[in-house]
Amino acid sequence: MRKSLLISVLTIVLAAAFSLMCASVATAKDKPIKWKMSTPWPPGNDYFNVEKHFVDIIHEMAGARLEIKLYSGGEIVPAIELLPAVQNNVLQAAGDWPGFWIGKNTAFNVLAGFPMSPTWTDYMTWIYVRGGIDVFNEVYGQYGLYYFPHLTAQNESGVRGRPGTKKLKSLEDFKGIKIRMAGRLQGYILKKLGVAPMTITPSEIYQSLERGLLDYAEYAYPHVDWSIGLHEVTNQWNAPGWYQCGSVMGVMVNKQAYDALPKDLQAIVKYAAQATMLWSSCRSKLLSGVYTNKFLDRGTEVNMLDEASLDQIQLWAYEGLLEEAKANPLYAKAAYLFFKTAQEARPYFELGELPLTKREAIYPDMEALKKAAGDLLKE
């Protein structure tokens, strides 16, 4: 009797202990993983919305299992210190433009976007179909990072000029001007143009133009230019944006932090970046059109660089690219694989798309369509 009672008590105690152990394991397993992530951009800059969208998707897909606290530019470290901050796990993730890190390795210039390059859709095709993502991770991997692109976008707006500045319609017009333009290969071309580019961070562009420290500046796309106030301090729009015909942005993630995630959370981070790229790239295309009209409605004057000038810039761009490639095999590898992808895709573009896209855009009678839709269109 006593023996049976003792066995029963021991069974109950062991079962309780096992239950507590399981509960403890479950609690530890379910404890949320917390990351700190910084963006280089202040909340007013439209690029901030891209990083916020990325984090929102992760929270939607991961529930409470992965919590990412997003900090705006400068809250933890300055933008230019984000790479080492993620490398050293001060931050587990940070948004960036690869061009920030050209001083560390010139290959970042190829990843970021460069003068007279193939298009943003060529970047996207290279990244997802022709192994471009592996090249990104080879470059970023040298610093203990994984890279997750979350934006590819069309060529940038162009060079914006203060009131009273001359129109940039030919190569001669560039001589001696005070201009802000980012990128190493971009700087090579400016030197050929007789221009010494000024190093101005994005946060300083507005005030530098306002105070006359700069006469001209490039930044991004029409809606992003507007978000930092360039419509207030410029009235000249010198197009096209030859200095960056496609660009990529993304999120740097500390390798150890990412490798420590369960496999499903790793996948969520990866595919959240891809979903953000789809959203942000389409959004950029749409908003660029909307904000082009906003600039024009304010009386901004558009000046177009002539074809002969663009032909010469093209020659200089590839001349500078080959110089960099000979000095840096990783730069050469990235450029070769990117251009090879663009070459593969080009034949159908020339045969199937260009004959239609080069025609003047003509639209149907929009008011008639609206009337036909009737109550189905709610405004």
Image: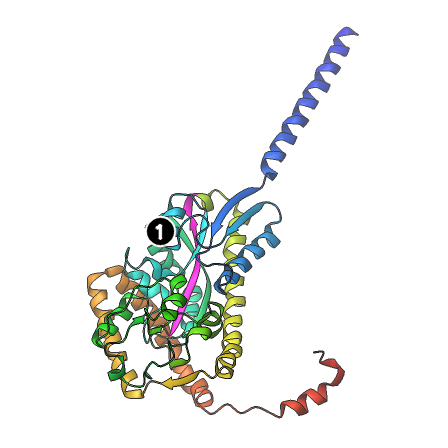
The residue wearing badge 1 is 141
Residue 132, percent from left and from top: 38, 63
Q: Front-most of 268 and 36?
A: 36
Based on the picture, tell me whether residue 324 belongs to the magenta stretch.
no
**Which residue lies at the image location 39% right of the left edge and 63% below the top edge?**
202
- Is residue 338 visible to us here? yes
Q: Front-most of 202 and 359?
A: 202
**Which residue lies at the image location 70% right of the left edge and 18% below the top edge?**
13
**Could you tell me which quadrant the N terminus lies in?**
top right
Left/right of residue 42 with respect to residue 210 in the rendered view? right
Q: Is residue 11 above or below residue 329?
A: above
Left/right of residue 64 with respect to residue 2 in the rendered view? left
Residue 23 in which image quadrant: top right
**Which residue lies at the image location 31% right of the left edge and 72% below the top edge?**
179
**Which residue lies at the image location 24% right of the left edge and 70% below the top edge?**
196
By secondary structure, the bulk of the magenta-drawn segment is best described as: strand
Report helix, strand or loop for mark 1: helix
**Could you tell me which quadrant the C terminus lies in?**
bottom right
Q: Residues within 10 Å of mark 1 (few under 14, many from 20)?
A: some
- Is residue 121 visible to us here? no
Left/right of residue 68 with respect to residue 257 in the rendered view? right
Start-end of magenta stretch: 245-256
Residue type, mark 1 in image: Gly
Specify the farthest residue to the front: 211
Residue 104 in which image quadrant: bottom left
